[in-house]
Amino acid sequence: MALTLSARCLGIAPSVTLAIDAEAKEMKARGEDVIGFGAGEPDFDTPEYIRDAAKYALDHGMTRYTPVPGTLSLRKQIAGKLLKDNNLSYEPTQIVVTNGAKQALFNAFSAILDPGDEVLMPAPCWLSYPELVRMTGGVVVEVLGDESNNFLVDADMLRQHVTPRTKAIVICSPSNPNGCVWSREILEGIAQLAVEKGLFVISDEIYEKLIYDGLTHVSIASLNDKIKQQTIVINGHSKAYAMTGWRIGYAAGPANVIKAMSAFQSHSTSNANSIAQYAAEAALKSGDEIVKNMVQEFDTRRKLIHQLINQIPNLSATLPEGAFYIMMNISALQGKTYQGEPIENSMDFARLLLGAQKVAVVPGRPFGADHHVRLSYATSQENIKNGLARIAAFVDSLE
């Protein structure tokens, strides 16, 4: 038999976000002055009280295997958080702690999808969603939103794509990559559709704490008992608590789904990092004020980057309502050239910008938005000002 790789593995595209972030870091390591708007990672240090909890766990030998779905104390703490913040009541047996929210998503798709099952994917969407669906045998059905409506997709738009093979709908609010926040009204319509058609809802709420302008995060699972029984809530500690490298995510949902996810995890990775679990428990106990301060700074950066983008001729952006991303519309530049090289799509724009001005942005194509690029404003105000000045210079140099 030939030593070939699996078709499933060969069909998966590497993460463009991580690739661009890695390239920018390599350029910095070589001494190049690179400004990165790539990775979705808070630039704040993990708060000291969380680091202290990890040190305590290390010093007291809390380094053994834990139960696969996580320590009981952490799951109880997560259940308390879901009740307090989201008006959702779950038992610890309905919660599984994972190696980051990405594993929670992978486990959820693995638990509910059979080969050929279709997943409705409002787009632009986080570029890992389609790949995770394909990795678990599912079929992605993109439902494109429009910038004029803040990229939001409603139940009527989704309904047009429902078939006998449709199994689930993915929601991310606030959204990566565009920062839109799904209103209660839109969520109620989607919940009604999901209940009517018997569809799972995967609700990624990792950015729920990062929301602006007095808007309120609504978890679709909190709308009524029927949709709660069909929803898998995904969340984690990476964004709100600046704990990206700690790799703590979690899922909450129907007991049978969580049981299946835990069984799957028991043979793939077993428990999440034990020390990080104890730190995550501490994060939930007393992090509200720190999160509030971080959100205030993100809000300032959000307004700054939006203003600077819209001051550049032929570029525009909609003001995001949550998360820490902004989608920059580059459609007016498509067809122009830089030193004889054409800009035909977002991939060309990102590549030429990085080479010319040493500014890293993420192409919109993997998100389903080839007329845009994504910028993360999880970086300093100084970097935002300098980076947008370089982008302006790049745009000015185009022919």
Image (spheres, grey):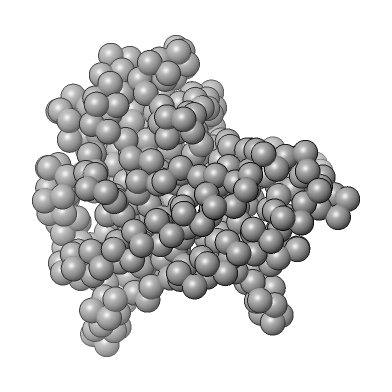
- Horizontal and vertical percent position of residue 258: 28, 42
* Residue drawn at the location 33% of the way across and 14% of the way down: 197
* Residue drawn at the location 18% of the way across and 64% of the way down: 288
Q: Is residue 48 left or right of residue 31?
A: left
Q: Is residue 341 left or right of residue 207?
A: right
Q: Is residue 298 above or below residue 93?
A: below
Task: Tell how many labels.
Answer: 0
- Horizontal and vertical percent position of residue 327: 52, 46
The quarter of the picture where the N terminus appears is top right
Residue sitting nearer the eye, 112 or 219: 219
- Horizontal and vertical percent position of residue 81: 16, 54
Say whether residue 69 is visible: no
* Residue drawn at the location 23% of the way across and 79% of the way down: 49
Residue sitting nearer the eye, 366 or 50: 366
Q: Is residue 87 left or right of residue 312?
A: left
Residue sitting nearer the eye, 288 or 355: 355
Q: Is residue 231 left or right of residue 267?
A: left
Say whether residue 205 is visible: yes
* Residue drawn at the location 37% of the way across and 76% of the way down: 45
Residue sitting nearer the eye, 391 or 94: 391
